[in-house]
Amino acid sequence: MSKIVKKYSKLAITLGLILAIVAMYFGTPIVRAATISDRELKISDSREGDQGGTGVIYDFQGDHSGTTVMCLRLQICTTITGGCTVPDGLDTTGGAKDSTNWSGWIAANFNGNFTTNGTIDYLHTDAGQSGGNDYSFSTSGITNPDSSATYYARVTTYSDSCGGTEVDSGVVAFAILQGGITVSAAVRETLSVTISDYAIGFGDLDVSNVRYATADEAGSTSEPGSDLPTYIQVSTNAGSGMVITIKDIGDGAGGAGLYSSGASKLIPAVASSAVSAGSEEYGVYGKDAGTGITIDEGFDDDGNADVAIDDTMLTFASSSGVLNAINVDISAKASIAGTTPAGTYSDTLILVVTPNY
């Protein structure tokens, strides 16, 4: 009986020790960091290294507990847990506080520490700040890892100092890619030219008046308005602009002007500003040029260095850059003498638009 009593006594002592140890374990308070929810790491560039040349922005966002914290820490690691191995090529030492992207946390009250590569610390300058929903802190000037892979951002907040007592924590994965998707496109050289009216006329010429060509071919003693009697419209993406050249057919034998085959008579071309009533004269000129087009001095009808149209190409107007549906008017005036033979007179104007790429 004595042996049995001793045996049960030892068992009781052993069970008592186990219970005491268990009581001590459960009675000791264990401080665990709360999980940061709704968390994400936004990066401004997913390409390897710093292909953008200006540094990458790492912006961590999440819902934090309302506990006051002194330190915000972001670590970039190759694994979710365990010791933090910094990815090859990652460089956070050139980082800087990106104050414009902070939310919730007051950026002005946190000083950044970027001396340890792979670890970014922000320490509060006073007594700390409590967390909340949709809080974010952002760092610019980071160089991404140099290999395409999935990496992990470990975020921890501390109530006293960086690396001290944990308050909140969370991990997010993010991917670094070899490069962006290259998108190619080609913009071809373009030129669009239209003429508003291919037939203009003076009507009946008389000795007493200078007549202007009109779109209805009836003619007028006064100059028609803008876009009349006809205009040439040019659109082109030629960066160095374009040139409009002009010539006439005349008599078809080297003589420029209004020609009547029936009367075998040529009303000769002169500078448009020189056309006067009572003389046999025919002038072609430009007017009302839109923005971007300049009428050549020889064809601007200003009486200064004006030239007569010819059966060889002359510069009529030009531009120095691109054009989008810009017009310049082509106009003409004529006069006759009392001895000008009766007949039907005509001329053909030929225009060439040459873009300069």
Image: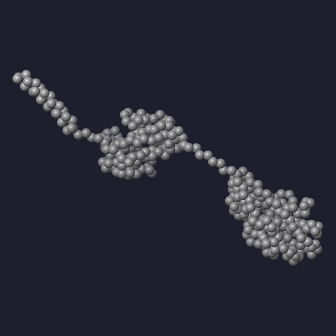
Residue 247 location (% of width, % of height): 84, 60
Q: Is residue 212 visible?
A: no
Residue 354 location (% of width, % of height): 76, 55
Residue in the picture at 54% in, 41% down? 179
Residue 348 location (% of width, % of height): 84, 63
> Which residue is at the front of the view, 219 or 307?
219
Give the residue furthest to the bottom: 208
Colour pattern of the rendering: one colour
Residue in the picture at 90% in, 63% down? 251
Q: Is residue 5 above or below residue 114?
A: above
> Which residue is at the front of the view, 126 or 136?
136
Residue in the picture at 85% in, 70% down? 334
Give the residue furthest to the left: 1
> Which residue is at the front of the view, 74 or 261?
261
Residue in the picture at 88% in, 63% down? 250
Residue 30 location (% of width, % of height): 25, 39
Q: Is residue 183 visible?
A: yes
Quarter of the figure that contains the N terminus: top left
How many tags in the picture? 0
In the picture, residue 328 is in which quadrant? bottom right
Q: Is residue 201 above or below residue 40?
A: below
